[in-house]
Image (tube, grey):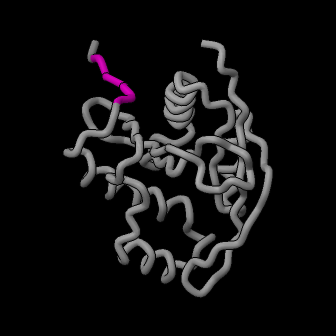
Amino acid sequence: MARVSIIVRPLEARDIPALSALREEAWRSAYRGIIPGLDLERFLSGGASGTLGKRVPCLVFEFDGRCAGYVTFGAARNQATDAEAEIYELYLKPEFQGLGFGQRLVEAVFDALRRRRIKRVMVWSLSENDPALKFYKRMGARPVMTRRERFGGNVLDKTALVWTLSTNL
C-alpha cells in the first residue's frame, strides 16, 4: 500500500514560486463573483504578493511532497480588536479545501502562538466570502467588526473575526 505524506512545516525559500501560483489560484477560486473579474486580474497581475516571502512566520501544508497550502501570521495590524496576533493569509489549492487541511494549518498557528502566550488572534475575511466566514466560525472565531476596503473600482466589506485561545500547554 502506498503511503502519502502530509506535513505542516516552516516556509523554505524554494517554496515561494509554488506558493505564489497557489495564492493566485486560490484568489481566483475564492473571490470570483465577489471581486469583479477585471479588478481581480488587475490586482493579481499588479504583483500583489501579500505577506508571502516577507519577514513573517509562514507554515506550509505539504501533501505528498508538493506545496498545497500555506498560512502567514504575526502581530495584529488593527488595534481596535484588541487581538495580539493576526492570521494574514490562509490559502489552500481548491482541491484541498473542505478536507480539514485548513483547520490543521490554523491549529498549527494556534500552537505556535500559545507557546508565546498569545491569547487573542484575529483574521480578516471579505464579508461576502461565505465559505471562509463559515470556516472561521466553525473553528470558534467570533465576528467583532467590519470595515470597507477598495478593490479597484469597488468598495467591499471585510469582517474581522477573533479567537480567544487557552494558553494552557
Query: Measuring 69% from the left and 63% from the top, which residue is drawn there?
Result: 158
x and y percentages locating residue 33 in the rendered image: 61, 71
x and y, in percent, of residue 100 in the image: 55, 31
View extreme (bottom): residue: 153
Of 32 and 73, nearer the camera is 73
| Residue pictured at 24% horizontal, 54% vertical | 17
Residue at x 71%, y 72% (from the top left corner) = 148
- Quadrant for the N terminus in the image: top left
Q: Quadrant of the C terminus?
A: top right
Residue 77 sits in quarter? bottom right
Q: Is residue 85 left or right of residue 140?
A: left
Apparent side of residue 167 relative to residue 67 in the rendered image (left or right): right
Q: Which region shows up in magenta? A: 3-9
Residue 95, picture quadrant: top left
Q: Is residue 51 above or below residue 56?
A: below
Q: Count the numbered circles shown.
A: 0
> Would residue 90 be seen by someone viewing this image from the given angle?
yes
Look at the picture and state if 96 lies above or below 3: below
The one of 164 and 125 positioned closer to us in this rendering:
164
Residue with the most extreme left position: 14
Residue 142 in the image: state x and y as whole percent: 78, 43
- The location of residue 82, given as percent across then percent down, is 73, 46
- Could you tell whether 158 is left or right of 3 in the image? right
Determine which quarter of the picture holds residue 127. bottom right
The correct choice, above or below, for 14 with respect to 119 in the image is below
* Residue in the image at 29% along x and 29% along y: 64
Q: Is residue 104 visible?
A: no
**Any magenta on residue 5?**
yes
